[in-house]
Image (cartoon, rainbow, N blue to C red):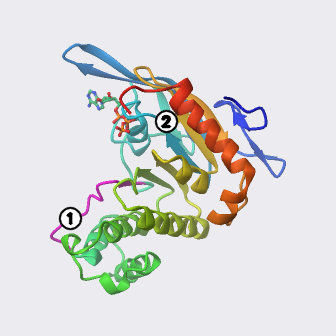
Amino acid sequence: MTNRNLKVVETSKQPKKLGLTRQPYLSIDKVSKVYPTSRGPFTVLKDVNLTIYEGEFICLIGHSGCGKSTLLNMVSGFATPTDGEVRLGGQRITKPGPDRMVVFQSYALLPWLTAYDNIYLAVDAVYGNKLKAEKDAIVREHLALVGLLDAAEKKPPQMSGGMRQRVSIARALSIRPQVLILDEPFGALDAITKEELQEELLKIWNDHRCTVLMITHDIDEALFLADRLVMMTNGPAAQIGEVLEIPFSRPRDRARIMEDPQYYKLRNHALDFLFHRFAHNDD
Ligand SMILES: Nc1ncnc2c1ncn2[C@@H]1O[C@H](COP(=O)(O)OP(=O)(O)OP(=O)(O)O)[C@@H](O)[C@H]1O
C-alpha cells in the first residue's frame, strides 16, 4: 500500500525550509562498500546518496544485515567507502574525529571506571589543555543533563541499562560533537526506559541542536524522533529506497502525535516498505 498524501523525498532532492535554500552539511555521495570475503568480494552498499542538513534529526531503518552500521561507520570514519565519499562541511571524512561521536547499543563504557571517570576520560582526551576544574565542570554539567549527578561514583556493573546508556550519551555530548551518531542506542532497553530516554534525547537535541544520525528498528521511535526517516532496501548492494518526511511540529508530544491520523499513514507506509515491498525472510 502506498499513500499519495505522504511526502516521500527523493534522496538527491534538497528540501527547503522557510523559503531558504539550505546548504548540504553531511553528504553521502555515491557511496559503495565492498568487503573482501573468502567467497569473493561482497557488495554491502551500492551508490548510496543522502544529503543531510545541519541540525537535522535523521533516523535510518532497514532489515538486519542491509548495511546500516556499515553506512554509519563511514560517517564516523571507522570505515572508508570503496567508492564515493562522505563529506562533513565540505571536508571528506577519512578517519574518526571528535566532531562525530558514536553511541552504541552495547554502551561501550569502561566497566572499571565510574560514570564520572568514563566521561572525564573523553573530556580529557579532547580538551587536554583545559584546567582540571574546567574539565570537572564539563563532566558534572553533562551528568546533570542526563539526570545522573547522584550516580557519578557508580561503575557500569552497578547501573541499570538505562543509566549506562545515559552515561554513554552524556560522554558523547560532553565533547560537543557536530554530529551525534546513534547505533540502535535503545534496542536493549525495556519499553518504559526506552520512552523516557527518547524524550530526554529529544530535549537535549532541542537545546543543543547537533545533527543526529540514528539507526533504529522501531518505526514508532523514528516517527517520534526524526525529521526524516531514511528507509533502506535489502542487501546485497543495498540502497536508500525512500526518505519519509516526518511533519509533526516540535516540541513533540507523544500522545498528541499518536492521535494524529497522519501518524498512522506514515506508520503504515513504513510498515509496507519493510514488510511488503522489501520483506526479509530472516526477520
Ligand atoms: N568487516 C566485514 N567483512 C565482511 N562482511 C562484513 C563486514 N562487516 C559487515 N559485513 C557484512 O555486511 C553486511 C551489513 O552489515 P551491517 O552490520 O552494516 O548491517 P546492519 O544493517 O547494521 O545490521 P543489523 O541491523 O543486524 O545491525 C552483513 O551481511 C555483514 O555480515
Would you say the beta carbon of the disc 2 residue lies within 8 angstroms of ligand 1? no
Region rendered in magenta: 101-113
Residue 138 placement: quadrant: bottom left
| Residue at the limit of the structure toward the right, as seen here | 19
- How far is disc 2 from disc 1 in space, using C-alphas? 30 Å
How many numbered circles does the render carry? 2
- Residue at (51, 42) in percent of width and height: 60
Which of the 4 quarters of the picture holds residue 231? Answer: top right
- Tag of residue 110: 1
Q: Earlier in the sequence, mark 2 or mark 1?
A: 2
Q: Is residue 126 left or right of residue 270?
A: left
User: What residue is drawn where x is 63% and y is 39%?
Assistant: 268
In the orientation shown, which residue stands out farthest toward the left? 112
Task: For the N terminus, give its image quadrant.
Answer: top right
145 up-or-down from 182: above or below: below
User: Residue 86 got which mark?
Assistant: 2
Say which residue appears at 43% left-offset and 20% top-offset: 237
In the image, farthest residue toward the top: 40
Visible residue check, residue 232? no
Name the quadrant where ligand 1 sits: top left
Secondary structure beneath label 2: strand
Task: Please tell me whether mark 1 sits on a helix, a strand or a loop.
Answer: loop
Residue density around tag 1, few if under 14, some if 14–19, many if 20 or more, within 10 Å: some
Q: Amino acid at mark 2?
A: Val
Instruction: Reply above or below: 69 against 188.
Output: above
* Type of the residue with mark 1: Leu
- Residue 261 in picture, x, y percent from top left: 74, 50
